[in-house]
Image: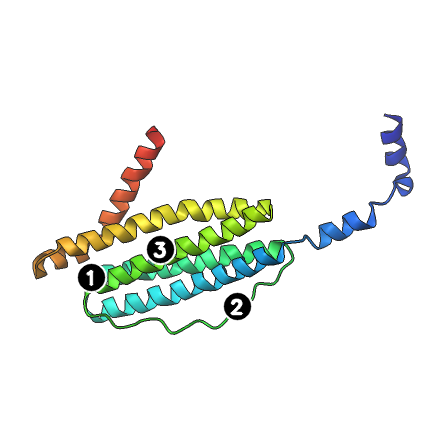
Amino acid sequence: MICLTLLIEHPDIAPPLPIMYTQAMAHPKIPAKVITEINRQYNQELGSAHSYRALSLWCEDQNLKGFACHFDRQAAEEYTHAKKLGSHLLDRSVLPETGPIPAPKHTFKSLLEAVQHAQAMEQANTQGINVVYETALGVKDYPAQVLMHWFINEQVEEERWSTELVERVQGATCAGSLSDLDRHVERLLAERLLADEKEAGQE
């Protein structure tokens, strides 16, 4: 209590923080390997957003309004993922490096090829996220590990819906069933997600 009273009455006598400690607070260190992998995944997510936008435009051109809307939402979601990665670097005093985004595939032979392309993108994103996590784990970067836990869980959902899209398109064997699927695709995916969440809550 005496020490606390002295500090309150005479704050000028409080000992300064060690120089090394204050420098660490101002410039948190991230292992170089983790910075490289987060930057890579940051740009990969931006590329995915670009690709989903191309998918949306192709579907719009094919008069597949439901799929166009769905892929447009996915483009926004991928951009949000990239922003989340960039914010993590900024919060730790590292400037994200935005690189050139390759031109996405923008024409497809069929809707099946389009949804298979989306599925392959999600599988690639999962692999990339796993690499970031493994790198962070190897160098004991705990903040990056926590961030990747969120992405790993998110990819379970992303791969689930992309696989379901492929299966549903494969099952739509005539023009009428494909048109019906297009009208209800977002509702069907939302219902499946809700069912999965309820099942997870019961475990």
Q: Which of the marked residues, 2 or 3, is nearer the chain's N terminus?
A: 2
Q: What residue is pinned by disc 2? A: 98
- Horizontally, is 56 left or right of 112 in the view? right
Q: What residue is pinned by disc 3? A: 123
- Amino acid on which disc 2 is placed: Thr
Above or below for 109 versus 126: below
SS label for mark 2: loop
Q: Nearer the viewer, mark 2 or mark 3?
A: 3
The answer to whether marks 2 and 1 mark residues whose Cβ atoms lie closer than 8 Å is: no
- Horizontally, is 8 left or right of 77 in the view? right
- Amino acid on which disc 3 is placed: Gln
- Horizontally, is 186 left or right of 203 in the view? left
SS label for mark 1: helix
Measuring from the top left, give residue 35's x and y in whole percent: 58, 58
Q: Say which of 131 and 119 sits in front.
A: 131
Tell me which residue sits at (13%, 58%) in the image: 178
